[in-house]
Image (tube, rainbow, N blue to C red):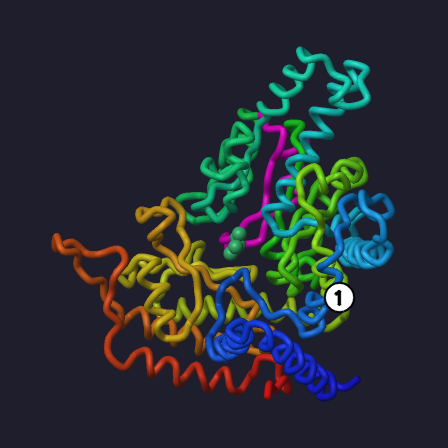
């Protein structure tokens, strides 16, 4: 089927779908239409967002949503799961083939859920199983109260070492307010204060001293690649399990931009990801594992997760099939090339970047040189139709709420077909907004961290120039709603 006829079919499908919805709750149909208009008319630079294909989106809107399927393929707690088995097995097969993983689990509903499954599996495999074997019990129900208390104590007293939030790690990597920072004794590694880069010797020294059960690698706001061979060496030296959260860069792994030591899958005992960021699938999670962890990961539902979202697993299968096409490799390379162009666009305009650049899909702009907090910068950019999110920079003086940075990513606009020239223009537009934004004063006369004034005319000027870029690269070309 040609791209043109596919777009025509999608238009018919969405028109019909919106009619059916409008017959029950027209305001939802209207908001759904408006969301498409808004996404089409703004510069989406949120590093964790993308645009899934109509095939992926349509797959989510079916009766698979109505089916309960707790358990795993061929081993469910409900009858009638034969078709769920088909789509879950397909999603897992595509994931194994795409990433070269021995085992894949397609059920997690999100990245946080995928990480919880991974933590639970590591604890089950490395703490619970040996304890049960030692005590000659088949499962926890056979333990005496005293042995159960001992197991609970050991389960709840393990150690995790992960990257700190302000260095680019994720909340679930042991950030103390998050569940991961409470279910484990946690310590964090950061980045070099001068360069902003990971220092593997520092990570190794911390690991030797702390001796964690789990070493977490991966990031959500670090604009550089990671050497996972080195992380595995560190884990092996201290007897830790290496868990890599590749949610942000899974598309770059799938698209063979990150290969060799930069591909986490062969090195990690367990790799987790979301499916909706650079991987461009439906909103959801995925766990990949080496064989030794497979049986424990497989019990993720119902031990950690509620019933799987079968309609989303079906959409994961479609998205992963898309990611196995050669065109996805070209897309992934464009993501990385475009991020470099965006970074160069900022550097030539004297803006400050954390680590001085990028070699993945993220650019982390330090907005203190504009005299702004991240929150002011994010809001002023939104006024001009540029959608970003504020983010901490290492050792951030403004904390995790106001922040001093704005995180930008290239996956979404690359899907629309933006290239290096367009990303250079995007840098120009962002600098235009930020250079024309000034912080307001609080009632006490100090500079506010939240409010600001964007000079007259700037938002309209930037919106007009963005519109030229966006019109050249339409979102879902050929998809027309009546
Ligand atoms: N929401 C993800 C991100 O934006 O990176 C993290 O959970």
Please give the name of the residue rendered at 59% of the width and 88% of the height, measured from the top-left corner.
482
Write down the residue under mark 1.
318
Q: Nearer the viewer, residue 263 or 348?
A: 263
Give the left or right position of residue 93, taking residue 425 as reference: right
The yes-or-no answer for disc 1 within 8 Å of ligand 1 is no
Q: Badge 1: few (under 14), some or many (20 or more) residues near its Cα, within 10 Å?
A: many
Please give the name of the residue rendered at 74% of the width and 87% of the height, measured from the top-left corner.
5
Visible in this render: residue 387? yes
Q: Is residue 264 above or below residue 202?
A: below
Q: Nearer the viewer, residue 159 or 340?
A: 159
Rendered location of residue 321, percent (x, y): 77, 65
Report the magenta residues as a range: 211-236
* Quadrant housing residue 131: top right
Please give the name of the residue rendered at 40% of the width and 51% of the height, measured from the top-left corner.
392
SS at mark 1?
Answer: helix
Rendered location of residue 170, percent (x, y): 52, 46
Give the left or right position of residue 88, taking residue 430 as reference: right
* Quadrant housing residue 152: top right
């Amino acid at each position: 089927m040609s791209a043109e006829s596919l777009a025509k079919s999608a238009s018919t499908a969405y028109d019909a779908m919106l009619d059916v919805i409008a017959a029950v709750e027209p305001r939802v149909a209207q908001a759904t239409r408006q969301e498409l208009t808004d996404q089409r008319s703004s510069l989406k630079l949120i590093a964790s967002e993308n645009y899934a294909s109509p095939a992926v989106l349509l797959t989510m809107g079916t009766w698979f949503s109505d089916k309960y399927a707790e358990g795993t393929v061929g081993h469910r707690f409900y009858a009638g799961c034969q078709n769920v088995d088909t789509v879950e097995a397909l999603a897992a097969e595509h994931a194994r083939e795409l990433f070269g993983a021995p085992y894949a689990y397609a059920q997690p509903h999100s990245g946080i859920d995928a990480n919880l499954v991974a933590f639970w599996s590591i604890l089950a495999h490395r703490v619970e199983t040996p304890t049960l074997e030692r005590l000659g019990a088949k499962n926890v129900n056979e333990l005496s109260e005293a042995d159960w208390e001992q197991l609970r104590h050991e389960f709840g007293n393990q150690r995790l070492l992960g990257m700190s939030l302000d260095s680019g790690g994720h909340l679930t990597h042991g950030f103390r307010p998050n569940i991961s920072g409470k279910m484990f004794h946690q310590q964090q590694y950061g980045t070099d204060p001068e360069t902003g880069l990971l220092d593997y010797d520092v990570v190794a020294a911390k690991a030797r001293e702390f001796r964690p059960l789990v070493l977490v690698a991966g990031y959500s706001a670090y604009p550089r690649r990671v050497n996972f061979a080195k992380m595995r060496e560190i884990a092996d030296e201290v007897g830790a399990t290496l868990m890599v959260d590749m949610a942000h860069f899974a598309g770059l792994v799938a698209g063979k931009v990150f290969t060799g030591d930069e591909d986490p899958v062969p090195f990690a005992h367990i790799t987790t990801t979301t499916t909706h960021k650079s991987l461009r699938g439906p909103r959801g999670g995925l766990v990949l594992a080496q064989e030794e962890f497979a049986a424990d990961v497989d019990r993720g539902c119902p031990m950690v997760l509620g019933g799987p979202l079968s309609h989303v697993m079906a959409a994961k299968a479609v998205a992963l099939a898309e990611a196995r096409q050669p065109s996805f490799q070209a897309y992934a390379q464009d993501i990385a090339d475009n991020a470099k162009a965006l970074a160069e666009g900022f550097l030539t305009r004297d803006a400050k970047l954390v680590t001085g650049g990028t070699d993945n899909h993220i650019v982390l702009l330090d907005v203190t040189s504009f005299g702004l907090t991240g929150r002011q910068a994010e809001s002023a950019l939104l006024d001009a139709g540029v959608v970003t999110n504020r983010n901490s920079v290492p050792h951030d003086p403004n904390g995790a709420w106001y922040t001093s940075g704005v995180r930008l990513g290239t996956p979404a606009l690359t899907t629309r077909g933006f290239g290096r020239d367009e990303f250079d223009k995007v840098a120009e537009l962002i600098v235009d907004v930020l250079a024309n934004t000034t912080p307001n004063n609080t009632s006490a006369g100090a500079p506010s961290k939240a409010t600001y004034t964007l000079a007259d005319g700037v938002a309209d000027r930037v919106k007009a120039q963005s519109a030229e870029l966006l019109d050249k690269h339409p979102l879902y070309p050929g998809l027309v709603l009546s």
